[in-house]
Structure formats: structure tokens, C-alpha cells
Image (cartoon, coloured by chain):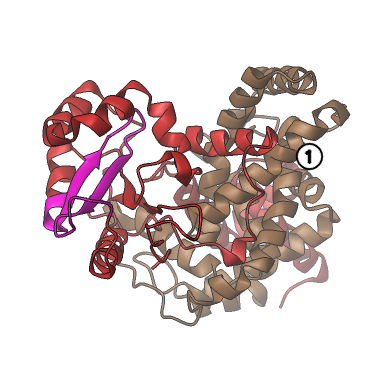
Amino acid sequence: MKGTHHNDSPSPAEPNYRTGSSVAREVELIARIAEGDRKAFEELYGLYHRRLARFLTRLTKRYDVAEEVINDTFYIVWRKAGAFRGDSQPSTWILGIAYRKARNAFRSSSRILALENPDAPLPPLTSDESLRTEELRDWLVHALVQLPVEQRLAVELCYELGYSCEEISTIMGCPVNTVKTRLFHARAKLQKLLPALGGATPADERDRKGSREKGKS
Amino acid sequence: MIATGDFACHEEAWLALPWLANGRLSQTERDKIEPHVRQCSACKEELAFQRLICDSLTAPDRVTYAPGPSFRKLMDRIDGTAPRPQKTGERSKVPASPGRAPNRGKVSPWRPPGLAWAAASFALVIGFVGVLSTVYRSSELLYTTHTDTARATPNILHIAFDRSLTIGEAEEALRSTGARIVEGPDSTGVIGIRPVASGAGDATSAGDRREMRVLSARLRADPRVRWVEPILGGDSPGERRAPLSRGQ
Ligand SMILES: [Zn+2]
């Protein structure tokens, strides 16, 4: 294992924006927001805006939709900050609100998203190593549009925002097994869609091995 | 053949792989599945794929969005000075998708618009000193116009470029699409533009409005453009400035 988010430390790694001190800071900000502190509100908004904007524009390809979800979310944060008791992490609480707002927004904007033509061919991938991460990301953004909303959101919460299975179940308000099932189906679909990539196994072969055969090295 | 116990192990590991990849599996869970993953080629291969997805989705973005304008919209709403937003499905398709940037691989970190940017653009818009004196004194004012057309210079396009763009590149992009700068940039890099071909006034004629739409479409197709938004004139139906049809 390598890298920062694939670490071998005994406890599960926290994404870098959710270290202990940042959690304490967010709890403090929420307490100040409950008293109507606008500076604290702006700071908390700033902490979440970038990651939510990225996560949501990736799913909708539209900043106006993302902005509406973010502002609907923080409108609730402003009004309900006093009800936050700290029995969940600030991030899980805020993402839970954002998840519900996003789900509703995606449903009401399905007419517009449909214009994106989910059947359009996905962009081809090259095997150039230097382009691979970025190109794969572009490809994933296209592929994600083809997944049902709940699966799309689960993918982003897990891979991009780095939440644990339990945290995602809190955010999505569903059992842990449902989270695993959503990810399972999303992964199977992504694998089917993934064209042969330099060094990667063709999707049908991997799918067959993954779901049916047991491979021993 | 797969022994039943092995298969159960494989299934359990397979379901947990996304969190092995994102590093959020507890030690207990890892102790349980890692011995299997180490000796199962399908799981190992899937784990590599899962990590590739993590790496791709966590790589820095080419495009970032400044929170300031959106936050001000929210505060307007909280203070009751802005109308509740329309339903998402009914809104104009305003901000452009990030698209595929030509400078792929060169991911630029957030770069606040520097003085050089402002100075160079100032030179470009020297003919519009009247407008600028307002805009430069208060970027706040210009940006609130993002939501409040009544306070904006009407019938212009507001545009923001990817922050990795140099001044020269942005100027060239505007020149080549037939745009001229009439405002800004403000402290967040937002520039007000009109088509070169339009009259000196408020783009009132049908021809001017068509030019605006063409320009807007051209700029939205440019992957270096973060977003383009038409700022419309006239809050009342009887106003002389016919609204530009939005979103196309
Ligand atoms: Zn296995």
C-alpha cells in the first residue's frame, strides 16, 4: 500500500479535511452560527463550498445546480445549527443535508440531465501513463451520469470524499448493507463501461473473474 | 472449484474493497479480509482498479469555484433581500461545464487575481472609466449584481476564466471570440463583456441580442471559461431593454 489515503496505520485514515482539530473547529463554528455569528457561517461555508461544488458539478456538470444544492444545504445549517448536538460529526451532518438536497435536485432536474444523452458514447481512453489519471477522471465523470442517483452519490462519497461505509450509511440514511450493495452495483456498471485501458484488464474479463471465478496467484 | 468458506471470504472482501482502497476500513475489518485479498488475483486486480478510481476522483481539479459570490447569494436569501431560487429544472443553463482543458496535466492551484491582471485589464477598458470607477472601488458591488440584475450594468455578459490562464491568454480568447471588455475584472476575476459588433449602448436591438447569444455560446464552448452569465436589463416589462433570452 502507498499514498496518503491508502495508508497502513492501525486506525482508519481520516481525509485530510477531517482531522481532529478541524472537527473541533467545525463544532465551534456551528455553536457560533447557532448564535447568529455570520463570520463563523462564512468560514464554515468556505470550508465546505469547494468540496461540495466539485462533488456536485461532477455529477450535474452545472455549477448553478451545485450552487443551489450548496445554498439550500447551508440555509438549513444556518437555521438548524442550534439543533446540532454533536452526536454525529459536523461533516456527516452537513453532508447528510446536502445528500437529501442533491437527491431532490437531481430528480427535479432529470429533464435537463436527460439532455446530456446518457447513451452517447464515452470518450476513448489512451494508454499514455501521464494522461491516465486525468483522462480516467474525465471518463468517470461521463460514466457516472449513467448510474442511478443513489449509486452516483455513493461513489462520490466513498472514492472522492473518503467516507467510511458507516458514515455513508448515516449520510444516506440507509443500512450499511444498502451502501455496500449500491457500491457493488455501481462498480459492476463502471467495469462494464470501462474500455480497455493500458495495463488494465478488459472489462468483461475482470467482471467475469470478479463475480464468478476465484483466482489464486 | 471454490470452497464455500473461501467464497464467503471472497464475497466479503469484494464488498469491502472500496474502503480498503480509500483507507477507511477499520483494523479489525482489514485483518479479516487482507489475507484473502493477498492471495486472490481477482480481488487484487479489483483493488488496483478501486485505487485508480480514488486517485482519479481525488486528483486536484482544473477548475475551482470561488465561494464568495454564492455565499452572498445565500446571505441575500437569509436576509430576505433575494427571491427564493427557482426550481433547478427551470433554471437557465448558465455555468459552463469544466470541459476538457487543453492544458491537461497542468493543474493550477488557486491563484488570486493579481494586481497585474487588474492593471492590464484596466488598460484594456480605459475607455470605460465611468463604469470602472464604480467597479474597481467595490468588487462587492459587481459581484452582488450576479444575483441582482437591477444593480448591474444591463445587457452584458459576465465571464470568468480558469485561473490558470495568463492575462495574454484571456485577452486573446476574448479577442478571438469577438468580445470587448466593458467592466472589470473585479477582485474575483469576473469581467463584463459585450460583442465587438454591438452598439455602444445597451444592446437593445434584436441584432445585438443575437450577437450576445452567439458570443455567449462561443465562450461556453471554450474549456478555459469557467462560466458565462448574461446580465439582463430591465426589471419591469415596460423597460426599454428587452431581456436577452437566457441560457442558450
Ligand atoms: Zn477474492
How many marks do you count on the picture? 1
Determine the residue positioned at 32% across, 51% down: B157
Q: Give the image location of residue A123, x and y in percent.
A: 36, 72
**Chain B palette colour:** red
Residue B27 appearing in the image: no
Viewer-proximal residue, B143 or B25? B143
Residue B106 appearing in the image: yes
The image shows residue A187, relative to residue A193, as above or below, that is above
State the brown chain.
A
Taking the image as shown, residue B152 lies to the left or right of residue A73, namely left
The image shows residue A76, relative to residue A123, as above or below, that is above
> Element at badge 1?
helix
What residue type is disc 1 on? Answer: Thr
Q: Write down the region rendered in magenta.
A: B174-202
Viewer-proximal residue, B109 or A16? B109
Q: Quadrant of the C terminus of chain B?
A: bottom left
The image shows residue B112, relative to residue B43, as above or below, that is above
Taking the image as shown, residue B203 lies to the left or right of residue A179, namely left
Viewer-proximal residue, A67 or A210? A67
Q: Is mark 1 within 8 Å of ligand 1?
A: no
* B176 drawn magenta: yes
Q: Give the image location of residue A92, x and y in percent.
A: 75, 38
Chain of the residue where label 1 is placed in the rendered structure = B
Residue designated by label 1: B28
Q: Give the image location of residue B240, x and y in percent.
A: 38, 57
Q: Quadrant of ligand 1?
A: bottom right
